[in-house]
């Protein structure tokens, strides 16, 4: 029986059926996790002070704002009341509610904008947000395959939009793909390696969008996330070098390109990027000299 089942699963014609079943199991695991979190959220709100309950009540009609308020309960210190009575947090929620009430933004647009701001490394609260908002679901291999298939579907859709130069649409799909691999965790080292590999790829996809849309600082941030776990990732080094050069951070860009040269002197595009960097540096020096000459009296 077991042998015949393995044979059935291994047949190419049965692959769509197997993948569909794996996706269904992954979704079921995530729904159970979400249901448990919802119950935990309800309990913590009911245990909170009357003032905290009154403060958050107006925002619970919108699912996107409900998600934000739910993060108030994620802190191990149990400080829901502190967040729910924080003037700055409430002002942000009120502004967000106004944008939704007036139709200035959809819930999807608001969620993407808020996440980008909160995840921006330049935001002082980014690290706190990442810690408080992070939920991890540990999945066995069969369910993990389903989750990674969903990740790949989002990433491939993003790739198609990128090829068509629909960069903002591509970014939305890449960010959804990233959210999947940041939500799950493998039970074995090989499963986790697969998750990490997919995460690094989609981080580089996001960096590429930010590069082409001239959001160079964000491109640097996403490449740096890759390099934090894989310092020899040459694609990340090359993209970060390009973004740094366009931010006029020439020394840092040169260091990244030197790191690539040490790893692979014949790496495709390396010589061209080094020449481009030298041109930018020379142009910057000429510009600085002209400015200095203009500022100094004759």
Image (tube, grey):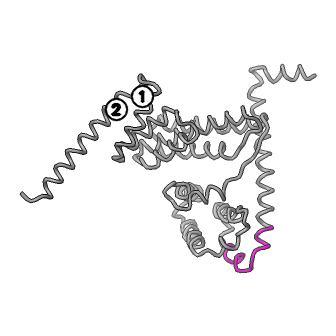
Q: Residue at x 57, y 65 (%)?
A: 100
Residue 45 highlighted magenta (yes or no): yes
Classify residue 232 as left or right of residue 40.
left
Q: How many marks?
A: 2
The residue at the far left in this view is: 298
Q: Nearer the viewer, residue 227 or 50?
A: 227
The quarter of the picture where residue 1 lies is top right
Magenta stretch: give its range. Answer: 43-57
From the image, which quarter does the C terminus lie in? bottom left
Q: Residue at x 56, y 72 (%)?
A: 88
Classify residue 291 as left or right of residue 193.
left
Task: Residue 273: give x, y in percent of width and height.
Answer: 36, 32
The vertical placement of 266 against 214, above or below, is above
Q: Residues within 10 Å of mark 1 (few under 14, many from 20)?
A: some
Task: Residue 31: give x, y in percent of width and height.
Answer: 78, 50
The quarter of the picture where residue 111 lies is bottom right
Q: Residue at x 58, y 57 (%)?
A: 127
Residue 67 highlighted magenta (yes or no): no
Task: Residue 49: give x, y in percent of width and height.
Answer: 74, 78
Secondary structure of the residue carrying tag 1 is helix
The residue that mark 2 highlights is 274
The residue at the far right in this view is: 1
Question: What distance separates the C-alpha of mark 1 from that of mark 2?
Answer: 10 Å
Task: Residue 296: give x, y in percent of width and height.
Answer: 12, 58
Which label sits on residue 261? 1
* First of labels 1, 2 by sequence position: 1
Q: Residues within 10 Å of mark 2 (few under 14, many from 20)?
A: some
Look at the numbered discs 1 and 2 and tell me whether their residues touch, using CB distance below 8 Å: yes
């Amino acid at each position: 029986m077991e042998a015949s089942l393995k044979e059935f699963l291994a047949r190419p014609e049965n692959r769509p059926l197997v993948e569909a079943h794996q996706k269904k199991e992954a979704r079921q695991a995530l729904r159970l996790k979400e249901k448990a979190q919802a119950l935990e959220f309800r309990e913590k709100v009911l245990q909170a002070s009357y003032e905290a309950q009154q403060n958050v009540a107006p925002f619970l009609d919108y699912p996107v704002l409900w998600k934000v308020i739910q993060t108030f309960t994620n802190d191990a210190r149990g400080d829901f009341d502190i967040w729910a009575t924080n003037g700055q947090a409430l002002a942000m929620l009120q502004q967000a509610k106004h944008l939704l009430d007036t139709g200035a933004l959809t819930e999807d647009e608001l969620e993407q904008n808020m996440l980008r701001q909160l995840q921006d490394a330049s935001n002082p609260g980014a690290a706190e947000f990442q810690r408080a908002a992070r939920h991890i679901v540990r999945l066995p291999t069969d369910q993990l395959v389903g989750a990674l298939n969903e990740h790949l579907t989002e990433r491939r859709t993003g790739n198609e939009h990128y090829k068509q130069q629909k960069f903002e649409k591509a970014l939305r799909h890449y960010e959804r793909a990233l959210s999947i691999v940041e939500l799950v965790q493998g039970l074995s080292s090989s499963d986790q390696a697969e998750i990490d590999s997919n995460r690094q790829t989609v981080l580089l996809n996001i960096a590429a969008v930010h590069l082409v849309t001239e959001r160079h600082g964000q491109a640097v941030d996403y490449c740096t996330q890759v390099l934090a776990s894989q310092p020899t990732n040459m694609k990340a080094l090359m993209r970060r070098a390009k973004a740094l050069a366009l931010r006029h951070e020439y020394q840092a860009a040169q260091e990244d390109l030197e790191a690539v040269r040490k790893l692979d002197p014949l790496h495709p595009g390396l010589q061209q990027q080094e020449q481009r960097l030298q041109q930018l540096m020379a142009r910057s020096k000429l510009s600085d000299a002209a400015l200095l000459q203009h500022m100094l009296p004759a």
